[in-house]
Amino acid sequence: MEVGGFFVFGFLVFLVKDVVMGGVSVKMMRYYREFLSNSMIQFVLFVGTVSSILTIVEFDRVKTILALLAGAVLYAVVEYLVHRYLLHQFPNAIPVLYQKHVEHHQYPTALRYLFSPMWYDLIVYVVYFVVLWAVFRNLSLVMAFIAGTSIYQLYYQWMHYIAHRPITPVTPWGKWMKKKHLLHHYMDEQSWYGVSHPVMDYLMGTHNPKSSKANGYMDGGK
């Protein structure tokens, strides 16, 4: 369950650090509760838990591991595509989500704009399940795909959350990714679309911020 361990490890690093330093701070406990109290996070956590349990029950060795990894990679790619094209370049594709993202850029520290609405993720996972079942007709593979995707999504959501909250990431990786995401918000909204990883930005050439908000939401750009 390497994908699940990746998210769990990152989350536990915060907890262990606080305990070693003299107990979990009231401030960090507030952020943990804040993150986990969001309805969308709770839904994805539920999906990840159920799919992970079924993945273990239906474990099919190499096939299951490959499906887990494929589900995580799929989300890592879609994360970039949705952010760049649906939330920035094509506002008429899903206007409700685009407008919510505009507000997120206008008020980047506002908690109400940090997470997508639960109905969106519910629809996505229902469609995702139907498509996977139509392709594989195999519960083990379908659940492994969904487990990999949902667990990676939790990692993504945590990275996005700490990027906008007054939290200092523990690892150099976390600090670097937070810096890049804030460059997307405060320097050039047409660069650094990746929140959880930079691979797609390097592949697509969007890793070099060009100027300060010259073509971003604040100036009415699309």
Image: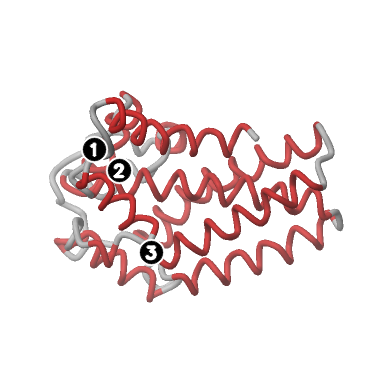
- Earlier in the chain: of badge 1 and badge 2, it is 2
Task: Note whether 31 is above or below 68 in the view shown.
Answer: below
Task: Give the class, few, some or many, for how many residues have Cα within 10 Å of label 3's Cα (few <14, many ≥20).
Answer: some
Q: Quadrant of residue 211?
A: top left
Amino acid type, label 3: Asn
Quarter of the picture containing the N terminus is: top right
Q: Residue at x 21, y 46 (%)?
A: 26
Q: Residue at x 31, y 31 (%)?
A: 19
**What number of labels is visible?**
3
How far across and how far down the image is residue 199, in percent? Answer: 46, 33
Determine whether label 1 and label 2 are within 8 Å by CB: yes
Q: Which residue is mark 3?
A: 38
How far across and how far down the image is residue 141, in percent? Answer: 79, 48
Amino acid type, label 2: Ser
Disc 3 versus disc 1: distance between alpha carbons? 32 Å
Quarter of the picture containing the C terminus is: bottom left
Q: Residue at x 75, y 58 (%)?
A: 132
Q: Which residue is mark 1?
A: 209
Foreground: disc 3 or disc 2:
3
How far across and how far down the image is residue 101, in percent? Answer: 31, 64
**SS for dot 2:** loop
Q: In the displayed image of the protein, which residue is found farthest to the front?
A: 22
Query: Is residue 62 left or right of 190 when viewed as pictured?
Result: right
Query: Is residue 99 left or right of 78 when viewed as pictured?
Result: left
Q: Quadrant of residue 170?
A: top left
